[in-house]
Amino acid sequence: AARRAAQAGRASGSPHGKLRLYIKDTDRFDEFVATRRGYDAAAQAAVSVDSMTKWQPVSFYRLTQVADTEALMRRMRSAWEPIGVRGRVYVAGEGINAQVAVPDVSLDLFRKTVAAMPELEGCYLNLDDPSDVHYMPFTKLQIKLRKQVLADGLDKPLDWSNNGKKLSPQEWHEALEPLVTGAEKPPILLDVRNIYESQVGLFKGAKPLDTITFRETWDAFRRELEGVEKDRLVLTYCTGGIRCEKANAYLIQEMGYNNVAALRGGIINYVQFAQSKGLGSRFTGVNHVFDQRLGQRVDGEMLASCMNCGAPCDVQTDCASTHCPRPYSKRRFIQCVDCAADFDGCCSTACRSEHAVRTEIAGMEAEEVQLRSSLKRARDRAASTGKRAEGEAEVRDLEGRRERLRLHKLAAESRV
């Protein structure tokens, strides 16, 4: 009995139990929150997200051991939600990978939040072209726990810090000169992105790996580098840099190449550099990005063509049919505006027909729900003494409509 009384006292926080101290009740709570977020309440109050004029796309990553992933995710959310950040962030034991959109008025605070997180120490922030306030690259902030921030399919992790040199955009531009001039022994330039990315844009002289997922990179390396000397300069690039971190570690540690380098900050960083310096970009076409923009046009050259009519085109889309028979990994395709209209956003006439039928069925199901509600009200009126005749006539009419709708739906379902 005495033990139960003591437990009750502790649970209630009474003077007879253990003393409960909540940090939010202390004078240093605001200081504690500011340290974790990277900004204090006054700095947050000075920023009005409602006054923003642009979204600033920011991508960043870091491959490092994260001891407490859940705690890091909570710190990110508590720091970024109050200043209007949206985007997609993956956290795993191996590191962080993020693509976010930051209100222009919050960018300075956002930089401070990144600097305040030890797990992001030294992290390079890749800033893409700002977009209009009415065009949201992301609709909300998603911070997700993953087994890996970049799924690689390897049996064992490598030493991601041993992955060769990182070239600045200026150094990269100069390193590609032998490919432009047609030198006798130019570097091997590998595009480590997937096929749907490289088919709409790439560096001149690059060899795309034509992979569907990053896991296929290792077999593609062995195919593309068969017979290549181990001291040959091998250059790799991707959208923002994270895939090169793992790819180059594999080239060095598993394949024995000793002269490997990557483009720091990826295509995003290089395009910004070339534009700021007024240089002719050695990347041509469209840079595929992982937000609702899908692509960033770098120049006017079109490398791909419409899957349906063959016209020059680089607009990537996904089949509007939720039952498209193609594998999910191959759902992205190139389609011009005219064919998109002709095929109702589908990849083929078969998908267009099925999509039309399923859209029709969905409409009939919505109508069916409305009819059930109307029928219930009509039956209630028929049961009342004052409006019995009117109610019974309405019930018969609604039941007839429901039966006709049922037959039409059965006919439609037989076509899919």
Image: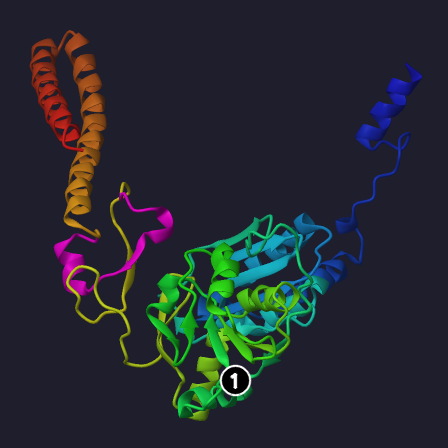
* Camera-nearest residue between 271 and 35: 271
Relative to 50, 156 lies left or right? right
- Which residue occupies the extreme front position in the image? 227
Q: Position of residue 142 (x, y in %)?
A: 51, 52
Q: Residue at x 44, y 81 (%)?
A: 271
Relative to 202, 261 lies left or right? right
Residue under numbered circle 1: 172
Q: Is residue 17 above or below residue 210?
A: above
Q: Position of residue 365 (x, y in %)?
A: 21, 30
Q: Residue at x 21, y 51 (%)?
A: 346
Relative to 386, 173 lies left or right? right
Q: Residue at x 54, y 65 (%)?
A: 243
* Camera-nearest residue between 67 and 308: 308
Q: Is residue 119 on the magenta stretch?
A: no
Using a 10 Å C-alpha cutoff, classify the residue at mark 1 as few (fewer than 14 neighbours), some (14 to 19) or many (20 or more): some
* Camera-nearest residue between 245 and 13: 245
Q: Amino acid at mark 1?
A: Trp
* Camera-nearest residue between 409 and 365: 409
Q: Position of residue 300 (x, y in %)?
A: 28, 81
Q: Is residue 409 above or below residue 309?
A: above
Image quarter in which the N terminus is found: top right
- Quarter occupied by residue 91: bottom right
Q: Is residue 244 above or below residue 388?
A: below
Q: Secondary structure at mark 1?
A: helix
Say whether residue 340 is visible: yes
Image quarter in which the C terminus is found: top left
Region rendered in magenta: 324-345
Say whether residue 87 is visible: no
Q: How is the image coloured?
A: rainbow
